[in-house]
Image (cartoon, rainbow, N blue to C red):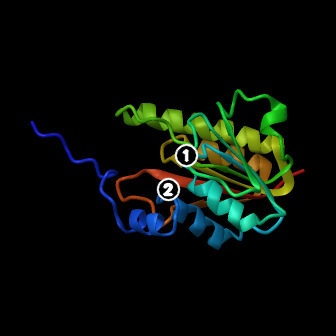
């Protein structure tokens, strides 16, 4: 039996536009839309980017915060993309790095997490692992985020989503769900955005 074509391999207009703009992946347009809709990134901010590879979010955010801003990008995989001078890359498990390394520029005005599990083909398993990554990233944001700051975290839609939203509202006054236009039709991912971090 012939295998199904992988919908993620075929370049689409977002993939082509990202390459033309010098970004390694189409995911940059997801962050660009969230930023545009939420007024997320401004000059001089301090940003933590969890799950940064291949680097599109880090490059976009570093440009938006300018030379007076600081960004720490973290991923367990190496980053092939060169970052602007106001950004630093740290390779390692974001949840196992020493506090002084992860908190290099803390407190962070914005914590970003585009992390997703390596899918196993089991919908329930993939959803559970995505939920776990989201909750761990939110815990980092709760610990290292600045009062009044923001959090953006990716999660696969499932019965766990309401639990994730409740936990987010414990730490942030504002909450919004965004499914950017650049999200592929076959994807179940959505972004939960927290604003105005509580003291």
Q: Nearer the viewer, mark 2 or mark 1?
A: 1
Where residue 65 is drawn, which disc sits there?
A: none
Local crowd size for mark 1, using a 10 Å CA cut-off: few (<14), some (14–19), many (≥20)? few
Query: Which of the 4 quarters of the picture holds residue 118?
Result: top left
Gap in Å between the C-alphas at discs 2 and 1? 9 Å
**Relative to 163, is 14 on the left or the right?**
left
**Relative to 115, is 125 on the left or the right?**
left
Local crowd size for mark 2, using a 10 Å CA cut-off: few (<14), some (14–19), many (≥20)? some
Of 136 and 19, the residue lying toward us: 19
Query: Which of the 4 quarters of the picture holds residue 121?
Result: top left
- Residue 15 picture location, percent across and down: 41, 62
- Residue 183 picture location, percent across and down: 44, 60
- Residue at 17%, 40% (x, y): give it: 3
The secondary structure type at the circle numbered 2 is loop
Residue, disc 2:
24
- Residue 19 picture location, percent across and down: 45, 64
- Residue at 39%, 66% (x, y): give it: 16
- Farthest residue toward the left? 1
Of 177 and 96, the residue lying toward us: 96
**Relative to 180, is 15 on the left or the right?**
left
The secondary structure type at the circle numbered 1 is loop
Q: Quadrant of the N terminus?
A: top left
Instruction: Determine whether label 2 and label 1 are within 8 Å by CB.
Output: yes
With respect to residue 124, does 15 lie above or below?
Answer: below
Where residue 80 is drawn, which disc sits there?
A: 1
Q: What is the number of callouts on the image?
A: 2
- Residue 6 picture location, percent across and down: 27, 47
The first of marks 2 and 1 along the sequence is: 2
């Amino acid at each position: 039996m012939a295998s199904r074509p992988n919908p993620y391999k075929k370049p689409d207009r977002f993939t082509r536009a990202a390459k033309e703009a010098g970004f390694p992946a189409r995911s940059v347009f997801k962050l660009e839309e969230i930023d545009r809709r939420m007024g997320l990134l401004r000059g001089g901010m301090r940003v933590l980017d969890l799950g940064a590879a291949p680097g599109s979010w880090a490059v976009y955010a570093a440009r938006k915060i300018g030379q007076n801003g600081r960004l720490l990008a973290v991923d367990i995989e190496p980053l092939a993309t060169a970052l602007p001078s106001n950004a630093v890359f740290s390779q390692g498990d974001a949840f196992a790095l020493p506090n002084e390394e992860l908190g290099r520029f803390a407190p962070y005005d914005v914590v970003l997490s585009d992390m997703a599990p390596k899918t196993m083909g089991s919908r329930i398993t993939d959803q559970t692992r995505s939920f776990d990554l989201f909750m761990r990233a939110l815990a980092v944001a709760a610990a290292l985020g600045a009062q009044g700051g923001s959090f953006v975290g990716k999660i696969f839609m499932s019965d766990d989503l309401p639990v994730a939203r409740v936990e987010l509202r414990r730490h942030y006054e504002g909450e919004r769900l965004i499914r950017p236009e650049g999200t592929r039709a076959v994807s179940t991912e959505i972004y939960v955005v927290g604003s105005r971090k509580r003291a």
